Amino acid sequence: MGERAIWSGAINFGLVNIPVKLYSATENKGISFHQIHNKCQTRIQEKRWCPKCKRFVEWDEIEKGFEYSKGKYVAVTKEDLDSLPLPTKDTIVIQAFVKMKEIDPIYFDKNYYLQAEAKTTRSFNLLMNALEGKDMVAIGSFTIRSKERLCCLRPVGGILILNPLFYPDEIKVDLNTKLSKIKTSQQELNMVSKLIDMMAQPFDVKMYKDHYREAFQKVIDAKLEGVKIKQPKLGAPKGEVIDLMEALKRSLENTNGRKTVSKRTARRAGKQLKLVDGHKHFARPKAG
């Protein structure tokens, strides 16, 4: 069974209308916990309690409520939400096309992807090709889960990604705050710049791993097997103050040392390679 769409509607810009379905593009694989009773290791059940009626309430008795004043609520039904006079209720209304670099990453929320219905695939692909050719993204609005969201549509390979965007009043930090004028020396700045240059490389997400999940799995396996895991000593000892210049100097030395070892290993491996029938093979070291 295929993945279920979480929203369906259409992309609209000018007189163009492209029916689409929206799917989740990412999956959070973080560690999640449950509450359990420490006496018997049984999972705790949470009950819905009404303090006025003094009894537990079943799900079919519960509805949404909007607090219009302190402690006073008005019930809001699905029919109320469906009747909202919004042009973006079933449509992604494109309002502008902008350069991707003009959008600060802080505005991006979640990741979804759009798929067109079979009969409108040509129009859908045409929009994606045009956006990719112009190196631009579409900015629009659509309504999902009882909220109108600003959004960005951007082609990534052969997929059209939709990112809901935060509105300006949802950003808690002032993006126009100027850099603090803390006095730094030119030598410090040069050393930091050099360290950045030495560590610079193209972004490859496959290089990075979730070490927390790996370590957590080891802890769980050890607990199930009744084995104790030794706690590794990490970081600088408490109370130790490291001079900034000394820390930068050590960082440069360590980084340069790692690069030298990597280059030496690569050269050694290269010397062991020889061509056999047009293919590279490791040469066996000579005896004696």
Image: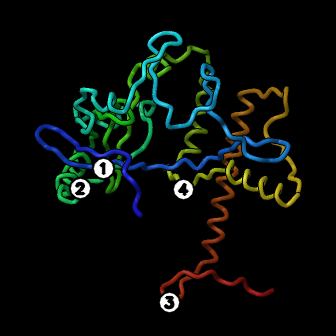
Contact between marks 4 and 3 (CB within 8 A): the answer is: no
Foreground mark, 1 or 4?
1
Which kind of residue does numbered mark 4 sit on? Answer: Lys
Q: Secondary structure at mark 4?
A: helix
Compare marks 2 and 3 and give the one earlier in the sequence. Answer: 2
Contact between marks 4 and 2 (CB within 8 A): the answer is: no
On the question of residue 177 being in view, the answer is yes
Q: Is residue 195 above or below residue 51?
A: below
Residue denoted by label 2: 117
Q: Secondary structure at mark 3?
A: loop
**Of 174 and 201, the residue lying toward us:** 174
Compare marks 3 and 1 and give the one earlier in the sequence. Answer: 1
Foreground mark, 2 or 3?
2
What residue appears at the point 55 percent right and 47 percent down from the top-left corner? 28
Cα distance in 3D space between marks 2 and 1: 8 Å
Residue denoted by label 1: 21
Which kind of residue does numbered mark 1 sit on? Answer: Lys
Cα distance in 3D space between marks 4 and 2: 32 Å
